[in-house]
Image (spheres, rainbow, N blue to C red):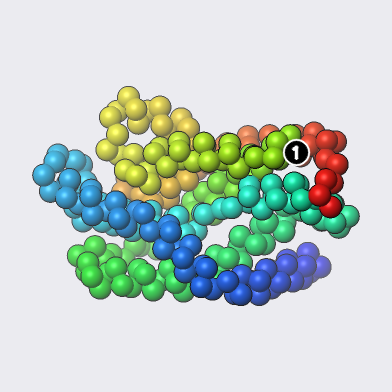
Amino acid sequence: MKRIFRKALIFLSVYYAYMVEYRAELILWVLANSLPIILMGVWIEAAQGGQFNLSPVDFARYFVAVFIVRQMTVTWVVWDFEKEVVEGKLSPRLLQPIDPAWHHIASHVSERIVRLPFTLLLLVVFFILYPQAFWLPNVADILLFILAAILAFALRFIMQYSFAMLAFWTERASAVENFWFLFYLFLSGMIAPVEVFPEPVRAIVLCTPFPYMVDFPANLLVGLPVDLRRGFLSMLGWILLFLGLNRLLWRWGLKRYSGMGA
């Protein structure tokens, strides 16, 4: 265990140093994920004149929580892996006694650490401008949110990493992710809370993996009612499903990999 822990720390320290070199770019990435803050204003206005189960303050807190979830779960592994396969850069990693996936995991985790100060700064500015939305979640909600956010990141990562495996068959695996992102955008709760969906639509959406990557952890942080058992079991089920698919595509893909561009 000590050896594994030491290797993990080395991995994280290396990728942390790499991410620190791109602090200015990270600020742009944080701002690029501020769409929920923009949509918050739209839904606050709609709540003042419409009939929703959520108040304007509830909408404000929800979209702040969505912003936090997005900062914790953003992934880009499909573009990195696609580049490695197309350019042959995957070859030297296959010679290492470790699955290449751990390079991408370490990269994402290190990026979260570097991103954290910028995210907190934006939150402070937001609450200064809109103090009515400030709230302090209780300890139970925070712990459940952390667990849900970790699982949401795992699900988002393994889904995108599964699409990345298609790079063994096509040079534009990222195109599949771009298409899939449209469903993620509208069904995850990032554009609108799943709570405001019509009941038949909401029932269908809850059978997909999308709401558990944004809406479910956001509701936990805000303290809105959720089905904890269904939420966590659904996340674990989808993670295992895509993990199995990922490992199959990895094995089949390696048989086709020729190291072109190396």
Quarter of the image where one finds residue 204: top left
Q: Amino acid at mark 1?
A: Phe
Residue at the spot x=88%, y=55% of the render? 95
166 to the left or right of 206: right
Q: Residue 108 appears at what percent x and percent y?
A: 61, 60
Kindly give the residue lying farthest to the right in the view shown.
Answer: 95
Mark 1 nearby-residue class (10 Å; few <14, some 14–19, many ≥20): many
Q: Would you say residue 38 is visible in this rendering? A: yes
Kindly give the residue lying farthest to the front in the view shown.
Answer: 261
Figure label count: 1
209 to the left or right of 159: left
Q: Residue 226 appears at what percent x and percent y?
A: 36, 43
Residue at the spot x=65%, y=40% of the render? 172
Q: Residue 203 appears at what percent x and percent y?
A: 37, 28
Image quadrant occupied by the N terminus? bottom right
133 to the left or right of 248: left
Residue at the spot x=65%, y=62% of the render? 107
Residue at the spot x=58%, y=39% of the render? 175
Q: Nearer the viewer, residue 174 or 100?
A: 174
Q: Would you say residue 222 is visible in this rendering? A: no
Q: Residue 256 appears at what percent x and percent y?
A: 83, 35
Quarter of the image where one finds residue 51: top left
Kindly give the residue lying farthest to the top in the view shown.
Answer: 200
- Classify mark 1: helix, strand or loop: helix
Kindly give the residue lying farthest to the left in the view shown.
Answer: 49
Q: Nearer the viewer, residue 18 or 70?
A: 18
Q: Nearer the viewer, residue 206 or 118?
A: 118
- To which residue does mark 1 refer? 168
